[in-house]
């Protein structure tokens, strides 16, 4: 603030470009001077809010503030999943999540979550997955209520961290524990776990399911004649057939590598006749597959349905016996047991 005995000149007014908030010139009146000084102090205090906002923009986290109706007061960063103008003067102030977010369903959930915080006075912490513009991202969200000096809730302050790299690493570690590295199918431990859960659910609800065990015929000859690299190609080709056929059957089965060239399929909510039909389709598909520089290959399959007295072991032993009988009776066939 500048107090001067002179009339304001153009040169003096240039001080306003350097954060001077007011001029006071003669004639001086005590009440007027006092009032304008207090106003100047208030303006300067208010400016510190925007200065704080500017400093917070230097942090990688997005820090934001909303009023009691879920409208943004400020946000230190904008994200690609916000539907905002390319105009550099565009501001988030005064807008709600539904106004600006591309994913309206997620925006609605965010606002409902905000209103619950306003109602209950309890903060929250969660991780949200966002898929917008073919980009999958994960954000860690912290939200806490903002209270005035009387304890009344006036809004929400939030912190948003992009944890996509961390969540992707967690997903990779989880997949590594349950996925067979060569085939991309479940490993034996995971498919066994799923069969155990299916048995448990069958005992509780009586739900029906079936299993198929399959094995590549004469696989030792494939390795001996064409080499282990070609043998791997045969295994991977069969695995791809199993993966690609899951959507065709409405995702009813889980496929896993049981070991070597053996595979196990768990068919949820599937009776024996349907399981046998699926097994036959898989057999035909593999038998009709062409392998460059190799002869055609075949598989044998055993099929069974869960019985009331079954344990996981008895079920697996029975379907293994079905596979053995398919092999003993000529191979390249489905044996129902």
Image: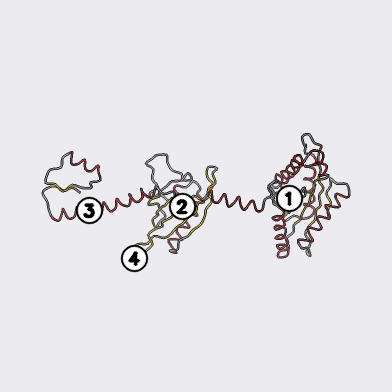
Q: Single out the mark in the foreground, 4 or 1.
A: 1
The x and y percentages for residue 270 are 74, 55
Element at badge 4?
Answer: loop
Element at badge 3?
Answer: helix
The part of the image, by quadrant, that contains residue 144 is bottom left
Which one is earlier in the sequence, the residue at label 2 or at label 4? Answer: 4
Q: Are marks 2 and 1 in contact (CB under 8 Å)?
A: no
- In the image, 123: left or right of 260? left
Please give the label number shown on residue 257: 1
Separation of residues labelled 2 and 4 (CA atoms): 28 Å
Q: Single out the mark in the foreground, 2 or 1.
A: 1
Q: Is residue 322 visible?
A: yes
Front-most of residues 256 and 248: 256
Front-most of residues 18 and 134: 18
Q: Single out the mark in the foreground, 2 or 4.
A: 2
Which one is earlier in the sequence, the residue at label 4 or at label 1? Answer: 4
Above or below, 9 relative to 116: above
User: Which residue carries the number 4 mark?
Assistant: 150
Q: Is residue 247 visible?
A: no
The x and y percentages for residue 316 are 78, 58
Report the colour scheme: secondary structure
Element at badge 1?
Answer: strand
User: Which residue carries the number 3 mark?
Assistant: 39
User: Which residue carries the number 2 mark?
Assistant: 160
- In the image, 280: left or right of 63? right
Front-most of residues 292 and 289: 292
- In the image, 166: left or right of 119? right
């Amino acid at each position: 603030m500048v107090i001067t005995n002179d009339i304001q000149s153009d040169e003096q007014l240039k001080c306003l470009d350097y954060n001077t908030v007011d001029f006071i010139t003669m004639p001086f009146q005590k009440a007027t001077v006092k009032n304008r000084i207090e106003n100047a102090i208030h303006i300067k205090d208010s400016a510190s809010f925007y200065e704080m906002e500017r400093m917070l923009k230097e942090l990688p986290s997005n820090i934001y503030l909303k009023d009691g109706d879920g409208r943004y007061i400020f946000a230190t960063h904008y994200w690609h999943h916000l539907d905002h103008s390319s105009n550099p003067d565009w501001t988030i102030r005064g807008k709600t999540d539904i106004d600006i977010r591309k994913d309206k369903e997620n925006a609605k959930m965010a606002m409902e979550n905000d209103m619950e915080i306003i109602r209950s006075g309890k903060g929250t912490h969660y991780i949200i997955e966002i898929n917008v513009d073919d980009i999958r991202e994960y954000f860690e969200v912290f939200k806490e209520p903002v209270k005035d000096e009387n304890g009344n809730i006036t809004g929400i302050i939030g912190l948003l961290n992009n944890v996509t790299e961390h969540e992707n690493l967690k997903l990779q570690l989880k997949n590594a524990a349950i996925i067979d590295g060569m085939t991309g199918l479940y490993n034996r431990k995971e498919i066994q776990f799923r069969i155990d859960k299916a048995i448990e659910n069958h005992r509780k609800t009586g739900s029906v399911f079936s299993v198929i065990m399959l094995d590549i015929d004469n696989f030792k000859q494939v390795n001996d004649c064409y080499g282990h690299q070609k043998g791997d190609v045969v295994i991977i080709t069969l695995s791809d057939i199993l993966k690609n056929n899951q959507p065709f059957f409405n995702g009813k089965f889980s496929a896993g590598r049981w070991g070597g060239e053996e595979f196990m399929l768990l068919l949820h909510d599937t009776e024996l006749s349907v399981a046998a039909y699926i097994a036959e389709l898989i057999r035909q598909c593999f038998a009709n597959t062409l392998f460059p520089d190799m002869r055609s290959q075949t598989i044998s399959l055993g099929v069974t349905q869960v019985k009331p007295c079954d344990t996981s072991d008895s079920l697996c032993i029975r379907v293994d016996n079905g596979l053995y009988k398919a092999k003993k009776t000529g191979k390249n066939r489905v044996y129902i047991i």
